[in-house]
Each structure stands twice: as C-alpha cells, then as structure tokens.
Amino acid sequence: MSLISLNDLTRRYPRGVTALDGLTLDLEPGIIGLVGANGAGKSTLIKILLGLLPPTSGEATVMDLDVRTEGTTIRQFVGYMPEYDCLPPDTSATDFVTHMARMSGLPSAAARERTAEVLRHVGLYEERYRAIGGYSTGMKQRVKLAQALVHDPRLLLLDEPTNGLDPAGRDEMLALVRRTGTEFGIAVVVASHLLGEIERVCDFLVAIDAGHLLRAAPLGTFTERTGVLAVEVEEGEAELTAALLARGLQAVADGRTVLLDVTEDRQYDLVRDAVADLGLPLVRMEQRRQSLEDLFRDDAPGSAVPSGAPSAAPLVGPPPAPPAAPPAASVGGGGPA
Amino acid sequence: MSASGPGGSIFDLGYQSYTGPRLGRQSAVRALFSQTVRSCFGIGRGGRAKIAPFTLAAIAILPAALAVGFAAIAAQAGPGGAVIENASPIRYESYHGLVSVLIMLFCAAQAPELFGRDQRYGTLPLYFSRVLTRVDYSLAKVLGLMVALFAVDVTPYLILFIGRVLVAPDPATGLADEIAMVPRFLLQAVLVAGLLGGIAALIAAWTPRRAYATAAIIAVFIIPPIILAIIYEQSGQELARATILFSPADVLAGTNAAIFGSIPDSPVVAAVDLPGWAYVGAAAIGIVATIGLTVRRYLRIAA
C-alpha cells in the first residue's frame, strides 16, 4: 500500500497564484519530512491530503483513497496538527481532547480513555485538568499533538510542530514526533521550513519550492554529501585560502570563513597545520550544513531545479546557523550537474 | 518495560492502538449537537457559564408558575372563580409577550459563545480535519441552539398546561378543555426558537467578537419595532404593512396572534391587519433563510 501518491498534482488559487505545480510523488509509510520555505506549498499540500482543498488538476490519494471523493474516510484515519494556535484557553486539555475524539467518531467512553492515554504519551499529567490558557507554549503544542493522535490515526500530518518553541522544547517535540513514528507505528508527515530540525526525525525527505518538487529521497542520500568544512578565522582568510590551495585542498574564502571540501580525515590535519603555520587566530572549525537548495541541487537528475541557475536566493537554512554561501556549494560535489 | 522497586513495579504499557469502534460522521454530528445544546445551558462549561441561562430560564418559567397558582385559587373560589381566572394576565396567548424578551436575551448571551469561540481561537481547522463536514458542523450548531431555545420557550407553556389540567375540578374535562392549546403553543415555540435562533446564529457566525455579536443580536430584535412604530406614526398603515415582515419581533407577535386567535400585544401589528398566514410564512422563510445563510458562512470561512 502506498501511503501518499500524487500524480501531476496542481493547485491554483483563484487569483492566479499557483501553490502546487505538477507534483508527482509516491510515498511509503515512515517518517516523512516535508521541507520548503514559507509559501512553498506545504500547507496547501497538507490541506489537499486531508481532502479539505480540491486539487485544480491531477490526482492525490492517501492510503489508496482519493482525496476528491473519499475525504471523510481519509479524515477518519488521519490526524492533523495545524501550524497556528487552535486551542480554546478556557477549557482543560482533558475536556478538549475528549471532545475532539468524539468529533472523530469515537464513542464517549473510548474518547475519555484514549484522551488519558495520549495525554500521558505526550507528557501532560496533572496539568491536564487545568485550563489550557495557563499552559506554556510547549504544553500547548503537546495538546495539539494529542488531539491529532487521540483517534489513533494511521497517518499524522504535522504542520510546523516546533513553531514558537525554545531549543529545549524543540528537542522534546522532535523526540515525541520520532517516538510517534517509530514506537507507535503511525506514519508521519512533518512539514517544516527548518531542514536542520526535520532531518533529525525523518527517514525520508521531500523538498518543495514554489509548488515544484525539488527532490524526494531517503534522508541518507542527503547527509552523505555534507562534507563541507567551514574554518572561521579572525583575520588572514586570504592567506589561509592560498595556503590550503597550495596543500592541494579546494578552498574558497567566504568573508571571514574559508570553505573547503573534506573527503578524508588526513585533510583536517592539513587545515590545522596551515592555520598553525600562518599563526592565524582560529575561531572555529565546523562541518557546515549546506543551504537546502544547494543540498538538493548537487546531483538530482530530472528534478525540477534549473541546474546552475544562480537566481534563487538560499531557500531555507537553519536560522541559528550562519547562511552558507551559494557559490561555495559547488565545492561540495564537483559542481552542479 | 518495568521499573521495580521495594514498593512494587511501575509498568509502562507503551502505546496502545485503538481497536474499538469508529462510529464515523453521524456519531460526531450527534455528539456536536448534544454538546451544543448542553453548552447553551452552561453544562460542561463551569459554574459561571450556568448563571445567565438558568436565570433567564427561571424568569421565563416564573409567570407560568404564578398563573397555575391563580388557576388554583380560581378553582377554590367556586362560582366566582371565573372572574379571577379571566383577570389573570398570564395566559397561553399572552405568554409570548412575557417571554420573548427573555428568549432574545438568551440568544444574545449564548449564540456568540457557540459560534464565536471556534472562530476566535482558531479551532475550526480541527473540526474540519475530522469526519464531519462544514455543513455538518454548522447545522449541528444552529439546530443545537434552536433546540435549547425551544426548551426554554416551551417549558412555561407546558407548566401552564399541566398546572391548569391538574387544578381543574375534574382533570379529565380539564384535559379536554386544554388539549387544543398544545399544538398551538408547540407551533409558536417552534417559530420563536427557529427564527430567533436562526437570526442569532447568523449574526454570531459573522461576528466572532463576542461583545459586538451580543449587541447586534439585541439590536436586531429591539430596533426594527421602534423604526416600524415611527414609520406607522409618520406615514401610516401602507408603509408599515410593507415593512413589518422585516421586523422579527413583530413577525413573532403576529404569529402569536394568528395562532392563538388573540388580539396582538403590539399596536402596530394590530393596525396593519395582515392575515395570519403572512406572519407564519414570513417566520418560516426567515428560519430557512437564516439556517441556509449560516451554513453558507461556514462553507466559505477560511479554516
């Protein structure tokens, strides 16, 4: 059974905005990351998968059910966690999640049992009897996850589940998402604009940009090619670049940072020696996460990316990390195809 | 997984899949409907939410209880009782005038809560991503409000009816005398609950801000009769007759007079002299239109 199958799926909004453009995709159950910048079409895709928004053209099936005609059946087996605030502040988590379980068609006693079960799973204990208005953002996100899980869906659609969370809250939420996908045996689609975050929980990554499919592949094939080392020095980056080139390394200066392709451990020693020989004040050396677009551009035959087009600005980057320089990415994989 | 200690063991059973029944869309709609009716009376919403609905319902019932008392005294008084009985201002035909303001206040208090909350707090996407559809959701809410209003409106009539049957010298003849009133007050209560509930639902669905919705609902019932009275004073019967069916409060005063065959409480309704079926028809159209427009609102709302 295929979990989600899209065939030339297109969605245009009335005022001529094309949110999704000819998406063709076949996804197996697992934890699937859906990455793209804000406005790339992630939320539109989720709404189509829920059967809430009809495709303009093309086909989409969820668990082999057509989203156009079998939306109600699909929604019985799908849980949805929206991006934005959706909780009434004057209700307790228990009452609210129980009500939502009833709205999914569970009998009343089962709704209460399932509510107790999922609230425990997302880590809400005594506080579940208090009004949601007094909860922290992290607790609210847990309630949102709980209401999506309460009817034991076969597929969970999470739209930006770490929205508004602090780093510790993000870690907890991501761990919860990971656990849901692995231990609970529920297929998960996590939409996020943060690649750095999403790659920590997913097995499979789907990247979309401006409604086009950039790439869909198992996560492993992305992380294999992240061998870019960033060396940040307080001064003397030109000398360092020259020294590294002289040692046979492909190095490119980018501001105070020198980016180079590292394929074997021995090369770290060369970098260390070069810095030491020049007596440069070294700030840091780090494995650099490439910007999302670069990551997908490297060798994605047949993908919709105009290869080598310099036009697009870096699509997405993990915000806390410094943005990688677009031209430097060609260091990473021998140049765009 | 288990953690053992001297006091015993804690077992983490892990995630349990749900294998019980999934009752689907119908069950969800029924649950939403009954939750709506209950929350109209503040049930499941904490103590403070119960104050307004129960106070209004108690005030609505009070005259009926008094009227039963009157009837009991009249029955005790023997032959002179008919005089006391006829002097009582609380009768089936006059009850609408006594309770319609309370029903309106009930609408103004509860409809904004029913229709505004899910919009204000962004909860609608959670409903629409489940088994029920937008039409299901809006119908369950509108009909839930109407049923709650019907209960508040019909209870005093029932008290009046049962009380009068019981205090009659012979309950059997009492029943025979009173039974003809039952379909009449049922119809009037259906029209009141339907029209006031429908209008309140439509306004509240369009006005997520609670205070504005409350004010708008009160205005729609209070202001048109005033304008109509001014129209009648200034330009006479013709224009008043042409516009009276746009005033919900006057339409219901008209249906009441038509259904019970009584003189209307409102002087304008009495003066325009429209046939009774016009009011009943206007109320019926109003009910269908407000339900339809409320559903349409939910079909188009972004969520």
Image (cartoon, rainbow, N blue to C red):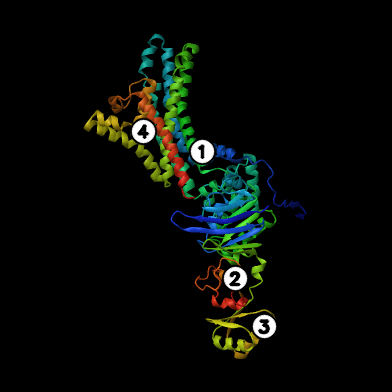
What amino acid is labelled 3 in the image?
Answer: Gln
Estimate the x, y position of residue A310 in percent, counting from the top left. Answer: 51, 73
Estimate the x, y position of residue A209 in percent, counting from the top left. Answer: 53, 64
Label 3 residue SS: helix
Whether residue A46 is visible, yes or no, is yes
Residue at mark 3:
A267
Residue at mark 4:
B248
Q: Residues within 10 Å of mark 3 (few under 14, many from 20)?
A: some
Residue at mark 2:
A295
What amino acid is labelled 4 in the image?
Answer: Pro
Total marks in image = 4
Q: Earlier in the sequence, mark 4 or mark 1?
A: 1
Estimate the x, y position of residue A9 in percent, counting from the top left. Answer: 56, 56
Whether residue A161 is visible, yes or no, is no
The reply to whether callout 4 and callout 2 are in contact (CB within 8 Å) is no
Q: Residues within 10 Å of mark 1 (few under 14, many from 20)?
A: many
The reply to whether callout 4 and callout 3 are in contact (CB within 8 Å) is no
What amino acid is labelled 2 in the image?
Answer: Leu
Q: Please state, as top left, top right, bottom left or bottom right, where the C terminus of chain A lies in the image.
A: bottom right
User: Residue A247: which quarter of the image?
Assistant: bottom right
Same chain for mark 4 and mark 1? The answer is yes
Same chain for mark 2 and mark 1? The answer is no
**Which chain letter matches label 2?**
A
Residue at mark 1:
B140
**Which chain letter matches label 4?**
B
Q: Residue at x 59, y 62 (%)?
A: A170
Estimate the x, y position of residue B152 in percent, counting from the top left. Answer: 46, 30
Q: Nearer the viewer, mark 4 or mark 3?
A: 3
Q: Mark 1 to mark 3: distance in Å?
A: 69 Å
Q: Mark 2 to mark 3: distance in Å?
A: 22 Å
Location of residue A96 with respect to B165 vertically, above or below: below
Q: Nearer the viewer, mark 2 or mark 1?
A: 2
